[in-house]
Amino acid sequence: MPVEQLTEEERDTWLRALPEWSLARDGKAIERKFEFADFAEAFAFMTRIAIIAEKRDHHPEWFNVYNKVEITLTTHDAGGLSLRDVNMAKKIDKLV
Ligand SMILES: C[C@H](O)[C@H](O)[C@H]1CNC2=NC(N)=NC(=O)C2=N1
């Protein structure tokens, strides 16, 4: 299914609903950093996201060191941000 890249206006509107996320890569991605008590908690969080990502066929780019997880969302198929990233970010926000 083709996915449309958001216009700048759409992007800015949607991002107001995601105050914990910031624009990255020239506006082509969004990112958020998380910190947990320890590695077990961080990895449990990543596991929950992995299951959601597989279901949606929309996968995060992420970086983990011990209790820290940095997540970047972008839509490769659209060459930038799409509603799929916004929806994924909302879903991730609900997990924490
Ligand atoms: C072939 C497969 O459906 C695509 O490559 C999917 C998989 N996961 C994906 N994840 C993300 N973040 N962006 C995509 O465009 C994307 N596309």
Image: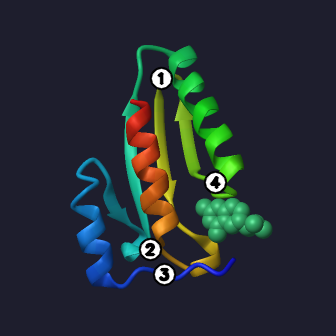
Between the C-alphas of marks 4 and 2, the distance is: 15 Å
**Quadrant position of the N terminus in the picture:** bottom right
First along the sequence among labels 4 and 3? 3
For mark 3, give the secondary structure: loop
Q: Which mark is residue 28?
A: 2
Q: Work out how far the residue at label 2 is from the one at label 3, CA to CA, in angstroms.
A: 9 Å
**Numbered disc in front, either 4 or 2:** 4
Q: Give the residue number, with chain letter if any, for mark 4.
A: 59
Residue 32, placed above or below residue 85: above
Instruction: Name the mark nearer the viewer: 2 or 3.
Output: 3
Residue under the point 65% across and 40% down: 50
Which element is circle 4 on?
loop
Residue depth check, mark 4 versus mark 1: number of the one nearer the observer:
4
Q: x and y percent of residue 18 in the render?
A: 28, 54
Which amino acid type is marked by label 4?
A: His
**Residue at coordinates 63% horizontally, 54% vertically from top-left?**
59
What residue would you read off at disc 1?
67
Of the numbered discs in the image, which one, if any, rests on residue 5? 3
Q: Residues within 10 Å of mark 2 (few under 14, many from 20)?
A: some
